[in-house]
Image: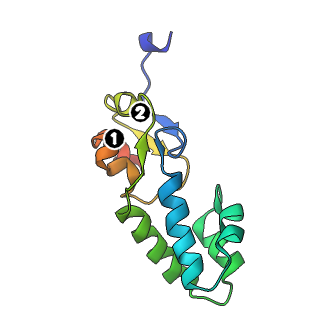
Amino acid sequence: MLTERSFAAFLFDMDGTLVDSIAATNRIWTGWAERHGIDPDAVLRTMHGVRAVETIGRHLPQGDIEREVAVLTQAEMADMEGVLELAGAAASCAPCRHGAGGSSPPRHGPWRSPVLNGQASRCRPCW
């Protein structure tokens, strides 16, 4: 059993593994699309599992992509409404000393929120 083993580090995906942030993510990207006159449904169909820079480049190729990424990243860090801890996530992160996120999250996002009681932030040094 894994409880009898120790590991130096682990790699994990954030959304769908530690937290469910789909509601916030969809809300933020919907607002972004609407502000730019882009069909939100088209953006939502293509943005999950894709880096923001690629999604923005696809839907707003003439825009300032770096600026748009920064704006979206800030919005995702600020909006924790509806972000939920998945069962056992905080407890899983509590003993962690080293880890890395596999979904390219910004350094201060849902894992730093009260949702995980700050537990996943212990993994931050490896990011």
* Most foreground residue, 39 or 7: 39
Q: According to the image, label 2 marks what residue?
A: 89
Q: Position of residue 26 (x, y in %)?
A: 55, 61
Q: Where is residue 19 in the image (x, y as percent from the top left)?
A: 46, 43
Q: Which disc, if any, is residue 116?
A: 1
Residue at horizontal 45%, vertical 68%? 73
Farthest-out residue, bottom: 62
In this picture, is 97 found above or below 70?
above
Q: Position of residue 61 (x, y in %)?
A: 68, 84
Q: What element carries label 1?
A: helix
Residue at horizontal 40%, vertical 47%? 126
Residue at horizontal 42%, vertical 43%? 84
* Image quarter of residue 99: top left
Mark 1 touches mark 2? (CB < 8 Å): yes
If you read the primary sequence from the N terminus, does the residue marked by circle 1 or circle 2 appear first? 2
What colouring style does the render use?
rainbow
Q: Residues within 10 Å of mark 2 (few under 14, many from 20)?
A: some
Horizontal placement of 17 versus 57: left or right? left
